[in-house]
Image (tube, rainbow, N blue to C red):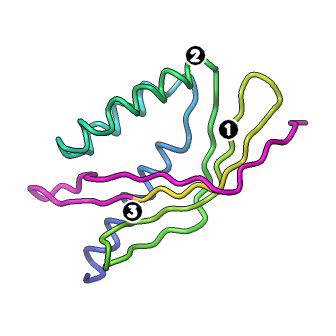
Amino acid sequence: MPKPIRKPKIAHGLYLAGLLGNVSANNAGFIESTVSRFVTPKAFRSYLTELQQQAIKVRDEQLTTHFQAMEAEYDPGTDLVSVSGLLVTRGVTDVEQRDYRTFQFRFVTRQHQTLLDELRIKDENTRLTAGH
């Protein structure tokens, strides 16, 4: 795929990973409504329920997540954008969970707008540590 098309897909992947990975009780609703504007009807049906359930969990359990992207790449063979990095989840206690998370996105372009058509999330290297 030519670089002019690849770069916007990576930029969209970084943007959405930043939204989906940095959630708190105060912004969960905002993230849910913002992400829903950038998805195809197929993806909207598939992911809306999951996003809503995650937003409820974050609000109910007073969780905060922080995502720090470390890699972003586009694979022209699969047409997937992968954004990987450290995800730290904290609750009201001093316990934090650290995961190496990879968001994988497949985008389509419709009427000059880039839309999310598929989302995969993979977590690796989970460990719990006491906060200081």
Disc 2 and disc 1: Cα gap in Å? 14 Å
Quarter of the image where the C terminus is located: top right
Residue with the mark numbered 1: 89
In contact (CB < 8 Å): disc 2 and disc 1: no
Earlier along the polypeptide chain: callout 1 or callout 3?
A: 3
Residues in magenta, as a range: 105-132
Residue 107: give x, y in percent of width and height.
27, 59
Residue at image coords 45%, 72%: 73
In the picture of the structure, the residue carrying the numbered disc 2 is 60
First in residue order: circle 2 vs circle 1:
2
Please give the name of the residue rendered at 69% of the width and 44% of the height, measured from the top-left corner: 88
Q: The disc labelled 3 sits on which kind of residue? A: Ala
Q: Nearer the viewer, mark 2 or mark 3?
A: 2
Q: Position of residue 69 (x, y in %)?
A: 58, 59
User: Where is mark 3, residue-wise?
Assistant: 11
Q: Is residue 15 left or right of residue 95?
A: left
